[in-house]
Image: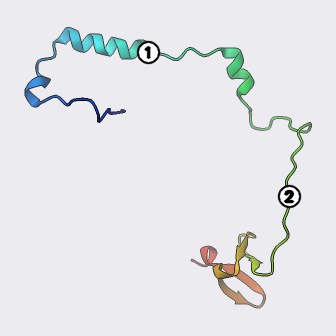
Amino acid sequence: MATDYDSPRKADDDLGEDSLQELQARRGDKASASIDLDESELAESLELPGADLSNEELSLRVIPRQADEFTCSRCFLVHHRSQLASDVNGQQICRECAA
């Protein structure tokens, strides 16, 4: 539940002063606050798993592995040399996989 820390706080003796009608009215106000969404907009913005993306084109620049980087033999991610934990028989393992 969100709390407004800037609003004045009620003292313990003030808490008992709220009448039952005030409390019910507040609860009714909170229940009536709903979000009105246009269903057609919602349906267009949703993308389902397994959707056909064959007509979509993705373009990005691929940078080759640099001289100060290595590929971990367990997770197959490219890391900086500072992340090298062990190098046994050409099997380079990063610190994260070695832990």
- What is the secondary structure assignment of the residue under circle 1? loop
Q: Is residue 78 above or below residue 87?
A: above
Q: Quadrant of residue 77?
A: bottom right
Q: CA distance from mark 2 to mark 1?
A: 47 Å
Query: Farthest bottom residue?
Result: 89
Q: Identify the residue under disc 1.
A: 33
Q: Residue furthest left?
A: 13
| Earlier residue among tags 2 and 1 | 1
**10 lies above or below 95:** above
User: In which quarter of the view is residue 95 placed?
Assistant: bottom right
> Which residue ends up furthest to the right in the rendered image?
55
For the residue labelled by badge 2, is the local secondary structure a helix, a strand or a loop? loop
Relative height, residue 22 to residue 2 (above, below): above
Q: Which residue is mark 2?
A: 61
The percent position of residue 33, horizontal first and vertical second, equals 44, 15
Instruction: Check the image and tell me how it is coloured.
Output: rainbow
Q: Position of residue 87 (x, y in %)?
A: 71, 88
Mark 2 Cα-neighbour bin, 10 Å: few <14, some 14–19, many ≥20: few
Q: Please name the amino acid that badge 2 sits on.
A: Arg
- Residue 37 place in picture, x, y as percent: 60, 16
Q: Residue at x 91, y 39 (%)?
A: 54
Q: Which image quadrant: the C terminus?
A: bottom right
**Which label belongs to residue 60?**
none
